[in-house]
Image (cartoon, rainbow, N blue to C red):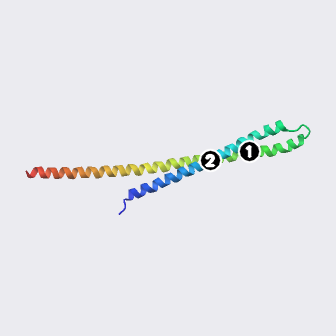
Amino acid sequence: MADPLATLARLRRLEVAQARKQLAERNVALAAAEARHDEACAAPGREGAHADAAVPADYAAWVPRALAERERAARAAQHSANLAQMARDALALHRTAERQVELLREQQAAAAALKTRRRQQALLDEFGSRR
């Protein structure tokens, strides 16, 4: 019969591995969202510097779209940051659960070792009393 704690430990290791993978994916998405936000923040300054004085209407029409894009990028970056934080929290919870199973297994092993030592001592005491 399989050891239930060994099975649970294997499950916890898989959960931690999955949580780490998800955190890595969330961090990649966060970096991309932050890069998009940085680009959106820098665009009005670049476009303003390159705007032709002869066509200010084009720049004036472009600015609201650029500001809206900057706002969308900021919201997307915040959303990605929230998802990354949730992934970090999930990883912490899974690691805690994994550690609890490890502690249970250590306690179980210690109890088994104590039981073995007591049994051996009882045999020694019995053998000594027969002499």
**Residue sitting nearer the eye, 19 or 100:** 19
Instruction: State how many labels appear.
Output: 2
Q: Residue furthest right?
A: 54
The residue that appears at 66% across and 46% down in the rendered structure is 32
Q: Amino acid at mark 2?
A: Val
Q: Nearer the viewer, mark 1 or mark 2?
A: 2
Relative height, residue 10 to residue 78 (above, below): below
- The circle on residue 71 is 1
Residue labelled with disc 2: 28
Mark 1: which secondary structure?
Answer: helix
Residue at the left extreme of this rendering? 131
Query: Mark 2: few, some, or many residues within 10 Å (few <14, many ≥20)?
Result: some
Q: CA distance from mark 1 to mark 2?
A: 21 Å
Q: Check the image and name the residue furthest to the bottom.
A: 1
- Name which residue type carries label 1: Glu
**Image spot of residue 31 (x, y percent):** 64, 44
The reply to whether callout 1 and callout 2 are in contact (CB within 8 Å) is no
Question: Residue 73's x, y, as percent?
Answer: 71, 46
76 on left or right of 113: right
Mark 1 vs mark 2: which is more N-terminal? 2
**Which residue is located at x 21 percent, y 53 percent?**
119
How many residues crowd around disc 1 within 10 Å: few (fewer than 14), some, or many (20 or more)?
A: some
Q: Position of residue 18 (x, y in %)?
A: 52, 53
Locate the N terminus and report the quarter of the image it occupies. Answer: bottom left
Q: Secondary structure at mark 2?
A: helix
